Image (spheres, rainbow, N blue to C red):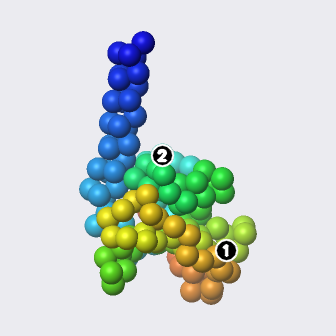
Amino acid sequence: MRATFIYLFLMVVLLMSCNSWRYGYTQSLAFNSYNLVSENEKNFGNKRVRYNMGHHARSPLAYFLKVKGKPDFIFEYEDDQKRDGINLYYLNADSAFLFIEKKKNTPSSSSFVEARKLNEYEKLTYKNLVEQKQLRAM
């Protein structure tokens, strides 16, 4: 019984560590750029959402994504205080949800900042992302 518990505990730690490592490893590619999120598991935006959920596993961000589901596209950034932030954009709801770490390098502190309607720039950005995806598929 005790060996099973230890084994399960190690598996959980390793799986969470994997997502945190992947989060950090792909961070420079993701920051300051918009990324589409699709059902395709190999889609970079989809991977970033998954890595964020693993890296911020015990935060309001992870809970929000579990309840609300994947967004249509995302924007990740680092603010002037070196805290990681992510904007989640949902077109059908015409909404943007913004999350940021309360403290630098504390993934469990990634908390909700604001909800608002999408602005015209964000709608145009989504349209451009979809057009670029279609061009690459040709």
Query: Is residue 60 at least partly visible in the picture?
Result: yes
Task: State the residue in front, 122 or 131.
Answer: 122
- Specify the farthest residue to the top: 1
Residue at x-position 68% and y-position 80%: 117
- Specify the farthest residue to the bottom: 120
- In percent of width and height, residue 104 lies at 33, 70
Residue 71 image-quadrant placement: bottom right
Residue at x-position 29% and y-position 58%: 24
- In percent of width and height, residue 21 lies at 29, 50
- Specify the farthest residue to the right: 93
Kindly identify the amino acid type of the residue bearing the numbered disc 1. Ser
Task: State the residue in front, 75 or 132.
Answer: 75
Residue 108 image-quadrant placement: bottom left
Residue at x-position 35% and y-position 37%: 13
Q: Which residue is mark 1?
A: 95
Kindly identify the amino acid type of the residue bearing the numbered disc 2. Glu
Horizontally, is 118 left or right of 76 in the view? right
How would you rate the neighbour count of disc 2 (Cα within 10 Å): few for under 14, some for 14-19, many for 20 or more? few
Task: State the residue in front, 1 or 87.
Answer: 1
Tag 1 secondary structure: strand
Residue 113 image-quadrant placement: bottom right
Is residue 57 positioned above or below 105 on the image?
above
- In percent of width and height, residue 118 lies at 64, 80
- In percent of width and height, residue 10 lies at 33, 30
Q: Which residue is mark 2?
A: 41
Which quarter of the image is occupied by the N terminus?
top left
Query: Is residue 70 at least partly visible in the picture?
Result: no
Is residue 72 positioned above or below 12 on the image?
below
